[in-house]
Amino acid sequence: MDGIHLFGEWYDCPADTPEFTRADALRTLCLAAVAEAQLTAVGDCFHQFEPQGVTGTVLLAESHLAIHTWPECRFVTVDVYVCNLQHDNREKAQRLFRTLEQALQPQRTKFRAIERGGKDGS
């Protein structure tokens, strides 16, 4: 399926922010960012690790968001994939990605985008 897959590695995030350390706060942030990007959440699951760290996913009608935090390392990984079945959703995916990045405030980032699918099968 045609779409865009965005990958981020975020370093040196402020480790004391609630969204970085608490599943409920990260869930609230992610669902608000999905709605703001005008994507459609159809389910979610967030898990709190002890003593710290959160992993979460939001299942989208358009595909998914996955996010994982390591407060002890001040590190986050994020994965946003959206399909373009009826509409080009690239800008929505990029908006979701940017909103999360702004909220978690990394000092250093790595980013990769992959165009998925292709009408010609290549």
Image (cartoon, rainbow, N blue to C red):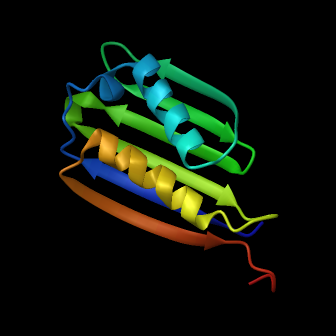
How many numbered marks appear?
Answer: 0
| Residue at (18, 44) in percent of width and height | 12
| Residue at (23, 48) in percent of width and height | 106
Q: 72 left or right of 43?
A: left
Percent across and percent down for residue 49 are 40, 18
Percent across and percent down for residue 20 are 32, 29
Picture layout, residue 74 above or below residue 111: above
Picture layout, residue 50 above or below residue 118: above
| Residue at (21, 29) in percent of width and height | 72
| Residue at (81, 86) in percent of width and height | 120
For the N terminus, the quadrant is: bottom right
Q: 25 left or right of 31?
A: left
Picture layout, residue 110 above or below residue 118: above
Q: Nearer the viewer, residue 48 or 87?
A: 87
Percent across and percent down for residue 83 are 71, 60
Q: Nearer the viewer, residue 93 or 45?
A: 93
Percent across and percent down for residue 116 are 66, 70
Give the quadrant of residue 76.
top left
Q: 116 left or right of 49?
A: right
Picture layout, residue 19 above or below residue 8: above
For the C terminus, the quadrant is: bottom right
Q: 1 left or right of 55?
A: right
